[in-house]
Image: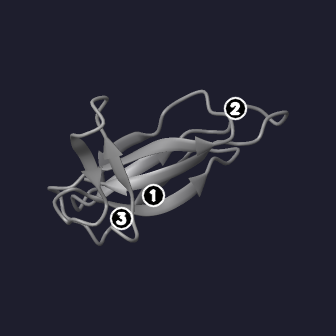
Amino acid sequence: MSHGLQIFAADGVTKTFDSTTAVGGCVVDIVTAKSTEITISYDAFDSYRTAYATIIGGVGNAGADPGHDANGHPTITIPVYYGIEFDPAVYMVFIL
């Protein structure tokens, strides 16, 4: 694999996520937490998919919440940043 993201289980062999395969998901966004909660809808994907996010930088006090909008498209809700004295959390969003 020359580009993309792969995540492996603790055994180091079992692949649990592969952004290069449609059924394994894909990275779709990088989002920085703001002073207010942010909900983003990914309308390129249907209701069979779900958005997930993980913190890749900064400081966060809560995970991002997956969901679906009124039309069934996956959404992700990014919580507010931890505090002004800390770098805000940066989330990598992917669709499974």
Nearest to N terminus: mark 3 or mark 2:
3
Question: Is disc 2 surrounded by few (<14), some (14 to 19) or many (20+) residues within 10 Å?
Answer: some
* Apparent side of residue 15 relative to residue 51 in the rendered image (left or right): left
Which residue carries the number 3 mark?
A: 42
Q: Quadrant of residue 47?
A: bottom left
Residue at 14%, 55% (x, y): give it: 48
| Percent position of residue 8, x then y | 31, 41
* Apparent side of residue 30 relative to residue 27 in the rendered image (left or right): right
Question: Is disc 1 surrounded by few (<14), some (14 to 19) or many (20+) residues within 10 Å?
Answer: some
Residue 82, numbered circle: 2
Quadrant of the snapshot with the N terminus: bottom left
Residue at 47%, 62% (x, y): give it: 29
Say how many tags the image has.
Answer: 3
Mark 2 and mark 3 in contact (Cβ < 8 Å)?
A: no
Nearer to me, 35 or 25: 25
| Percent position of residue 19, x then y | 31, 61
In the rendered image, the vertical position of residue 58 relative to residue 42, given as above or below: above
Residue 40, numbered circle: 1
Q: Label 1 amino acid?
A: Ile
Secondary structure found at label 2: loop
Residue at 28%, 49% (x, y): give it: 17
Residue 50, numbered circle: none
In the rendered image, the vertical position of residue 82 relative to residue 20, given as above or below: above
Nearest to N terminus: mark 2 or mark 1:
1
Q: Label 3 amino acid?
A: Tyr
Mark 1 and mark 3 in contact (Cβ < 8 Å)?
A: yes
Q: Quadrant of residue 65?
A: top left
Nearer to me, 31 or 71: 31
Residue at 35%, 43% (x, y): give it: 66
Nearer to me, 27 or 64: 27
* Apparent side of residue 80 relative to residue 10 in the rendered image (left or right): right
